[in-house]
Image (cartoon, grey):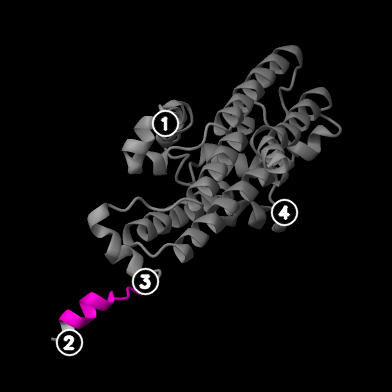
């Protein structure tokens, strides 16, 4: 029991803190040295911070596939299929559908890429078209407030009364992860005022640190969700359970006599 409790501390706040805080400190304090491992000048997509994001997104997709396999309830399976498809889409968006790998292998400079993207207006991904990115951020912030701030704090009696609410509400441990995200945002903002990082790979894109924690939050949420069971109404119990197991019901001797007569 103590080990399980300790592991929750590790997963929900110690691990994200140990992963993200060194990245932030190295990037600001030594931008021309170790900071280049966090976000290289050649392309920040090859750095640690961007690849952490890809790991977390891939983990979401793997968890969703696991959810599809474990679920025997159509609605839940459809939900996991949507999460799988969306996480694959986000993964492809993050790697610009492989464009930056192609550009690196073909020897395109960052200046050439900038000219094609900004001056010529070539499309690299969906989320950078027009104001789509701003809309996505607004929606994500709204969802995060509801999922990771409001739902965990709802009274337990409400969750017991409404099974669907109990299903979608994350544990209160996730509040610790949210606190780490806010702390990292504060540290990033503070260091940005102390150090001059203009001209570095993440100049103007410091939200990448926040984005990394956002993916980590949703990864934890999906891992919690896959461990739960879809809420089933009492009248639909026998239909749902039949797909998982077929309980054997034996008739009492008196009932057998009646049937024989």
Q: Is residue 194 above or below residue 62?
A: above
Q: Which is more N-terminal, label 4 or label 1?
A: 4
User: Distance of mark 2 from mark 3, alpha carbons?
Assistant: 23 Å
The local crowd at label 1, few if under 14, some if 14 to 19, many if 20 or more residues have their Cα within 10 Å, is: few
Q: Name the front one of labels 3 and 1.
A: 3
> In the rendered picture of this protein, how many numbered marks are placed on residues?
4
Q: Which mark is residue 36?
A: none
Tell me if 48 is positioned left or right of 253 in this view. Answer: right
Q: Name the front one of labels 2 and 3.
A: 2
Q: Does the segment drawn in magenta span residue 4?
A: no
The range drawn in magenta is 248-258
Q: Mark 4 points at which residue?
A: 107
Nearest the viewer among 121 and 74 is: 74
Q: Name the front one of labels 4 and 2.
A: 2
Q: Name the front one of labels 2 and 1.
A: 2
Q: Name the residue under label 3.
A: 247
* Image x and y of residue 162, in percent: 32, 39
Q: Name the residue under label 1.
A: 156
Q: Which is more N-terminal, label 1 or label 3?
A: 1
* Image x and y of residue 1, in percent: 68, 42
Q: Which is more N-terminal, label 3 or label 4?
A: 4
Residue at image coords 55%, 28%: 175
Indicate the secondary structure of the residue bearing disc 1. Answer: helix
């Amino acid at each position: 029991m103590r080990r399980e409790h300790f592991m929750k501390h590790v997963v929900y706040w110690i691990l994200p803190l140990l992963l993200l805080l060194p990245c932030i400190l190295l990037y600001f304090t030594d931008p021309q040295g170790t900071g280049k491992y966090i976000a290289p000048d050649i392309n920040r997509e090859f750095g640690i911070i961007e690849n952490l994001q890809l790991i977390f997104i891939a983990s979401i997709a793997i968890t969703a596939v696991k959810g599809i396999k474990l679920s025997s309830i159509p609605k839940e399976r459809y939900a996991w299929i949507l999460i799988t498809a969306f996480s694959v889409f986000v993964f492809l968006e993050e790697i610009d559908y492989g464009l930056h790998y192609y550009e690196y292998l073909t020897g395109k400079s960052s200046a050439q890429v900038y000219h094609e993207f900004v001056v010529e207006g070539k499309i690299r991904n969906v989320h950078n078209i027009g104001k789509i990115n701003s809309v996505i951020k607004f929606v994500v912030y709204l969802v995060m407030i509801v999922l990771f701030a409001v739902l965990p704090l709802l009274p337990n009696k409400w969750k017991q009364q409404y099974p669907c609410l109990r299903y979608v509400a994350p544990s209160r441990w996730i509040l610790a992860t949210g606190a780490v995200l806010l702390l990292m945002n504060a540290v990033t903002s503070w260091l940005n005022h102390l150090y001059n990082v203009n001209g570095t790979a993440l100049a103007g894109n410091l939200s990448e640190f926040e984005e990394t924690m956002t993916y980590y939050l949703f990864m934890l949420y999906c891992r919690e969700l896959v461990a739960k069971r879809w809420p089933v109404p009492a009248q639909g119990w026998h239909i749902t359970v039949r797909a998982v197991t077929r309980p054997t019901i034996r008739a009492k001797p008196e009932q057998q006599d009646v049937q024989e007569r």
